[in-house]
Image: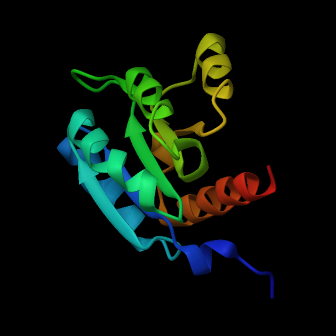
Amino acid sequence: MVFNPLLTLKPMVALIDNNKISSFFNLHEIQKCKNVSKVVCFDKTIDALNYLDPLTCILSKPIFVFMTMDMPHINGWEFIERTQKVKGSKEYLHIILLVKQELYIEEEIKINSYSNVSAINAFNMNHEYLDKILTKVFHNNMVS
C-alpha cells in the first residue's frame, strides 16, 4: 500500500464561482472526494479572500481553491495577485483555475509563473479526476 499524505492531512477546498448551476454541480463532485476534509463555497471573490486570509496564517494543511476566471469585481488574475501577498499562501494555498476553453499561450505562461497555481478544464470536474489532481498537486508541493 502506497502512503498518501492527503489521507492524513485532508485539505480543505474552497469553490469560487458566481454561476449557481455550475457551482452546484462542482460542489456535488468535490463533496464526493475522499481526500477532502471541508468544502466552502463563495459566489464573490472578495468574500473568499476575507475568509481565506486569516486561515492561511494558522493552518498546517493545504487549502485548494477551485475558481472560475471570469468573476465580477475581482477576476481570477487579480485574486491570484492578492493571494500572493497573504502570509503562508505559497505553502498552503493552491489555486486551480477552472477554464472552459483552451488557454492562450500567454495565459499558460502566466499560470506557470506561479508556483501555487494550475488550471484544469471545467468540463472534467468529477470526483475521481479531482482526487487525482489533489494528490498530484499535494505530492508536487511536498517534493519541491
Q: Residue furthest bottom?
A: 1
Specify the quadrant of the image occupied by residue 69. Answer: top left
| Labels in figure, total | 0
* Chosen colour scheme: rainbow
Residue 14: image location, x then y, percent? 36, 53
Residue 94: image location, x then y, percent? 54, 46
Residue found 60% across the figure and 37% down from its top: 118
Above or below residue 65? Residue 132 is below
Above or below residue 77? Residue 99 is below
Above or below residue 27? Residue 97 is above
Asked whether, in this view, residue 132 is left or right of residue 72, the answer is: right
Q: Which quadrant: the N terminus?
A: bottom right
Q: Residue furthest top?
A: 106
Specify the quadrant of the image occupied by residue 70. Answer: top left
Residue found 66% across the figure and 13% down from its top: 105
Residue 88: image location, x then y, percent? 52, 47
Residue found 64% across the figure and 62% down from its top: 132
Residue found 53% across the figure and 39% down from its top: 121
Q: Nearer the viewer, residue 65 or 129?
A: 65
Asked whether, in this view, residue 14 is left or right of residue 73, the answer is: right
